[in-house]
Image: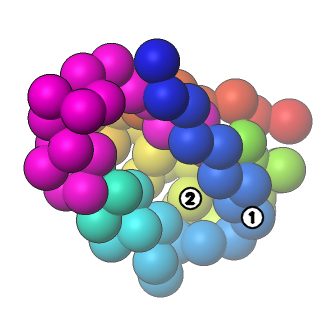
């Protein structure tokens, strides 16, 4: 399994696009990397980043969110 770890802090303007771009690349890798996950480690964002990540988790089951 491939795990991609992403630190995030107050990234509401870009986090959805960044996660979706990563998902697109990982899905294209298909047979080379059949199992993968994206782990976003949120270091206490004060904007909408946590909410956006929660919504994305519903659409991308391979997305894990750790909130500090």
Looking at the rendered image, the quarter that the C terminus falls into is top right
Q: Is residue 50 above or below residue 61?
A: below
Rounded to the nearest whole Å, what is the CA distance between mark 1 and mark 2?
7 Å
Q: Is residue 35 above or below residue 48?
A: above
The part of the chain drawn in magenta is 24-40
Asked whether 26 falls inside the magenta stretch, the response is yes
User: Relative to residue 55, is residue 50 drawn left or right?
Assistant: right
Q: Is residue 68 above or below residue 1?
A: below
Residue labelled with disc 2: 49
Label 2, residues with CA under 10 Å away: few <14, some 14-19, many ≥20: many
Nearest the eye: 27 or 67? 27
- How far across and how far down the image is residue 24, in percent? 19, 56
- Exactly how many numbered labels are in the figure? 2
Q: Secondary structure at mark 2?
A: helix
Residue labelled with disc 1: 9
- How far across and how far down the image is residue 17, in percent? 33, 71
Q: Is residue 32 above or below residue 14?
A: above
Taking the spot 84% from the left edge, 50% from the top edge, the residue there is 43
Q: Is residue 16 visible?
A: no
User: Relative to residue 6, is residue 52 drawn left or right?
Assistant: left
Asked if labels 2 and 1 touch by Cβ distance under 8 angstroms, the answer is yes
Q: Secondary structure at mark 1?
A: loop
Taking the spot 47% from the left edge, 81% from the top edge, the residue there is 13
Q: Is residue 13 visible?
A: yes
- How far across and how far down the image is residue 58, in percent? 25, 28
- How far across and how far down the image is residue 54, in percent? 43, 36
Q: State the residue lying farthest toward the bottom.
A: 13
Label 1, residues with CA under 10 Å away: few <14, some 14-19, many ≥20: some
């Amino acid at each position: 399994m491939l795990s991609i770890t992403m630190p995030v802090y107050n990234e509401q303007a870009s986090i959805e696009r960044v996660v979706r771009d990563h998902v697109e690349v990982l899905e294209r890798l298909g047979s080379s990397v059949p199992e993968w996950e994206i782990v976003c480690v949120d270091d206490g964002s004060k904007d909408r980043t946590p909410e956006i990540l929660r919504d994305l988790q519903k659409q991308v089951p391979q997305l894990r969110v750790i909130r500090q």
